[in-house]
C-alpha cells in the first residue's frame, strides 16, 4: 500500500512539473510574440505613407508581372510612398527593387519558413518574423493600399483577410488593387456568379477591390484615396511628420493639375 502511495505521489509530482514547464514555455512564447509586435510597430510607425505589395514568390525577372511590379513600385516610390513587402523573391523582390531605385524606403517583412530563400537584396529596412499572424498585422497596419499581383495561397490569404476585416467593419476600407485582369477576372467571376448567387457574400462586398492593369492608374487611385481621407479624418489621418510633408506635396500637385 505504501509503495502504491509513493508511486502515486511521484506520478503527481511529475505531472505538476510537466504542466509548469508547458506553462513556462507558453509564457516565453508570449514574450517572443510581444517582442515581434514591438519591433514591427517601432519600425513601421516611422516610415510615413506606405503601400503594401503582394504576389507570387515564383516569378523571375523575365516574367511580365515581375516587370510590372517593379514599374509600379518605382512610381509609388517617386511619388513619396514607402513600399512594404514580404521581403522574399518574385513580386516582393521586384517591388522592393523598384522602390529602392526610386530612392524610397523599401521595407521587407520576412517570415522564417523553409521555402523562403532569405531576404531579397533590395530592402532598405527589414525584419524577420517567426509568427505569421504578427507579420500579417504589420503588413496591414500602416498600409494606405494593397497592390496585389498574381500569387498563390499566401497572396490569397492576405487578400481575403483584408476583405474580411473590411466586410466585418474591423478596419477602414482602403484601396485593394488586383493587378492583372487576365489573372483576377476568373476569381471575380466566381465571386459574382457563384458566391453572390449562393448568398455567401453580397453584391456590395465586391466593391472592396478593383482590377487594374496600369501602374500609373494604381498610383492615381491611391493618391485620390489619400486626399479624400485626409479631408474626412483631418489630423487623425496624418500624425506622422513624414506624412504631413507628403500630404502637402500631394495637395500641391493636384491643385496645380
Image (cartoon, rainbow, N blue to C red):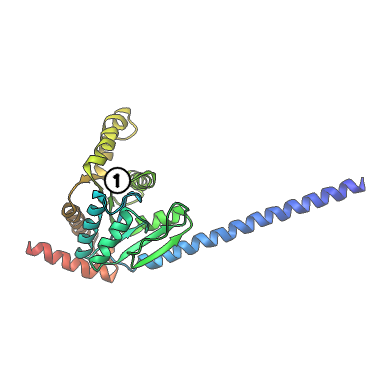
Q: Residue furthest left?
A: 257
Judge the density around disc 1: few (<14), some (14-19), many (≥20) Cα neighbours within 10 Å: many
Reading the image, the residue beneath label 1 is 150
Residue 79 percent across, percent down from the top left: 19, 63
Image position of 69 with respect to 101: above or below = above
Q: Residue at x 9, y 63 (%)?
A: 255
Q: Nearer the viewer, residue 180 or 175?
A: 180
Q: Nearer the viewer, residue 75 or 116?
A: 116
Q: How many marks?
A: 1
Residue 61 percent across, percent down from the top left: 28, 54
**Would you say 33 lies left or right of 174 here?**
right
Residue 237 in view in this figure: no
Residue 92 in view in this figure: yes
Q: Residue furthest front?
A: 62
Q: Quadrant of residue 51?
A: bottom left
Q: Nearer the viewer, residue 38 or 102?
A: 102
Q: Residue at x 54, y 62 (%)?
A: 31
**Would you say 91 lies left or right of 6 here?**
left
**Would you say 27 lies left or right of 54 here?**
right
Looking at the figure, which quarter contains the N terminus?
A: top right
Question: What element does badge 1 sit on?
Answer: loop
Q: Residue at x 12, y 66 (%)?
A: 252
Looking at the figure, which quarter contains the C terminus?
A: bottom left
Residue 68 percent across, percent down from the top left: 22, 53
Residue 143 percent across, percent down from the top left: 31, 57
Q: Residue at x 7, y 64 (%)?
A: 256
Q: Residue furthest top?
A: 198
Amino acid at each position: 500500500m505504501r509503495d502504491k502511495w509513493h508511486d502515486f505521489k511521484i506520478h503527481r509530482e511529475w505531472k505538476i512539473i510537466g504542466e509548469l514547464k508547458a506553462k513556462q514555455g507558453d509564457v516565453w512564447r508570449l514574450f517572443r510574440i510581444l517582442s515581434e509586435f514591438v519591433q514591427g510597430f517601432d519600425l513601421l510607425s516611422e516610415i510615413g505613407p506606405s503601400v503594401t505589395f503582394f504576389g507570387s514568390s515564383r516569378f523571375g525577372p523575365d516574367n511580365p508581372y515581375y516587370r510590372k511590379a517593379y514599374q509600379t513600385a518605382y512610381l509609388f516610390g517617386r511619388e513619396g510612398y514607402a513600399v512594404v513587402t514580404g521581403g522574399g523573391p518574385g513580386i516582393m523582390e521586384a517591388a522592393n527593387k523598384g522602390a529602392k531605385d526610386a530612392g524610397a524606403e523599401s521595407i521587407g517583412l520576412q517570415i522564417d519558413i523553409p521555402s523562403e530563400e532569405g531576404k531579397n537584396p533590395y530592402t532598405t529596412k527589414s525584419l524577420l518574423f517567426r509568427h505569421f499572424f504578427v507579420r500579417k498585422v504589420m503588413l496591414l497596419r500602416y498600409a494606405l493600399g494593397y497592390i496585389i499581383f498574381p500569387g498563390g495561397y499566401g497572396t490569397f490569404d492576405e487578400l481575403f483577410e483584408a476583405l474580411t476585416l473590411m466586410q466585418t467593419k474591423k478596419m477602414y476600407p482602403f484601396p485593394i488593387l488586383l493587378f492583372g485582369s487576365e489573372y483576377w477576372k476568373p476569381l471575380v467571376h466566381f465571386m459574382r456568379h457563384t458566391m453572390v448567387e449562393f448568398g455567401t457574400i453580397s453584391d456590395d462586398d465586391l466593391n472592396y477591390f478593383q482590377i487594374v492593369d496600369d501602374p500609373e492608374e494604381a498610383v492615381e487611385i491611391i493618391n485620390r484615396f489619400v486626399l479624400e481621407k485626409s479631408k474626412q479624418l483631418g489630423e487623425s489621418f496624418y500624425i506622422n511628420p513624414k506624412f504631413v510633408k507628403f500630404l502637402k506635396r500631394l495637395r500641391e500637385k493636384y491643385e496645380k493639375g
